[in-house]
Image (cartoon, helix red, strand yellow):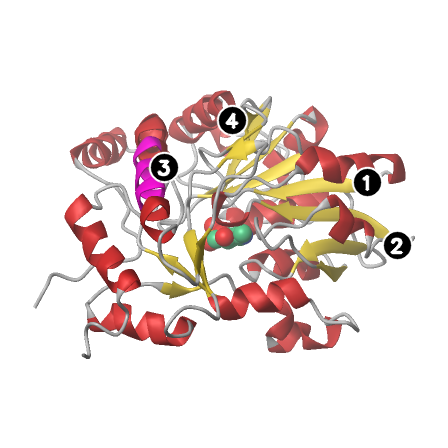
Amino acid sequence: MAERINVMQPWLDEAETQALAAVVASGWVAQGPKVAEFEQAFAEAMEAPEAVAVSNCTTALHLALVVAGIGPDDEVVVPSFSFIATTNAVRYVGATPVFADVDPLTGNVTADTVAGVLTPRTRAVIAVDQGGIPVDIDAIRAVTDQLRIVVIEDAACGAGSTYKGRPVGAGAELTAWSFHPRKILTTGEGGMLTTKNPEWAARARRLREHAMSVSAAERHKSILPLAEVYDEVGFNFRMTDLQAAVGIVQLAKLPDIVARRREIAERYRAAIDGIPGLRAVADPEYGESSFQSFWVEVGEEYPTDREGLLEALAHADISARRGIMAAHRQPPYRDLTPKNGLPVTEHLTDTTLILPVFHQFTDEQQDRVIAVLRNPGGASA
Ligand SMILES: *Cc1c(COP(=O)(O)O)cnc(C)c1O
């Protein structure tokens, strides 16, 4: 029996272990100096003036909506074609998610799909870099800026991807990032909110820490206990120094991670180009993907359908995944399905699957995957 191939594996080694040991030895394990150091390094890497570390990307999205002033009377445009957290965040602030369809090539919302669902109540758009493919943020902002609609980028999968030569996220007013192990960089669980707006950043910093007027770090510096005030209802969305120490090591690996993932994607694409009925995701002309998810669409010409290909891969001990979900098909959001449906979203959700890509993936392992793609009936024949 061949060794099992996972769809994703984080790239963790001795460097992360040592960074963790140093934090343990320091005695300061909750949010403190390492979180501040990680924020600074991340802000620099993503060309963002401000970075606020939080517990995960879902809480980053939630905070983004809060600091942008989105509330119960507001509509927020989101792709249904995304992990459900994108839509859930809108509900956390009491606003109404409005689903926009996506482009069939990128899987991302576009200026046209967003423009088609705007109403006088639209106050924000969450544009996702789906699977790492950069969203065309300038085109969307050309439509929304004049209407004073806030654009939030969900770059959960976007670390290492570029848009017009700059890191993704730099063109949005607020950008949310994930460090879940399924993403490009990991801190176990973790997230970041970046923004150019210093007031929003300052408010997010307070809100993540119960809206305390005195941070834990400030309190620690002062022997005499400082009196603190809680000006509004805050949250506990803090990252720990244990996580941040891992994040600093991971961030230094980002160029290597992206280079290797793009090499793997290129190799897949070269093979898939010659297989009738399969179409592989590709870079859009305005940017480069880190290929957090490398997906293929299974067309009519292919000898089996998406489910058949998933089974063939499983039979060869290769773990793949169904493509990106469609939030509007899930029970909390079914009643928000637009009248004419979301045809591209539904098509991509039903016909795509995600192939293994991870830093340690070997050419031999990839050849095993490619062999199944070429001959999905081979295993049972
Ligand atoms: C993974 C993901 C999230 C949620 O990230 P967490 O860090 O797990 O909260 C949100 N949006 C998108 C597009 C994602 O892929």
What is the x, y in percent for residue 95?
76, 59
Q: Position of residue 314 (x, y in %)?
A: 25, 71
Label 3, label 1: how many angstroms apart (C-alpha)?
A: 32 Å
Crowd around label 1: few <14 · some 14–19 · many ≥20 (10 Å)? many
Q: Which residue is mark 2?
A: 121
Residue 297 as seen in the image, left or right of residue 123: left
Q: Secondary structure at mark 1?
A: helix
Give the spatial CA distance, label 4 vs label 1.
23 Å
Q: In the displayed orientation, state which residue is furthest to the right.
A: 120
Task: Look at the numbered discs 4 and 1 and tell me whether their residues touch, using CB distance below 8 Å.
Answer: no
Which of pointers 4 and 1 indicates the residue nearer the eye?
1
> Mark 4 or mark 1, which has the lower sequence index?
4
Badge 2 marks a residue whose secondary structure is loop
Query: Neighbour class for label 4 at 10 Å: few (<14), some, many (≥20)?
Result: many
Q: In the visual, does 368 lie left or right of 309?
A: left
Residue 196: which quarter of the image?
top right
Mark 2 Cα-neighbour bin, 10 Å: few <14, some 14–19, many ≥20: few
Disc number placed over residue 46 in the picture, else none: 4
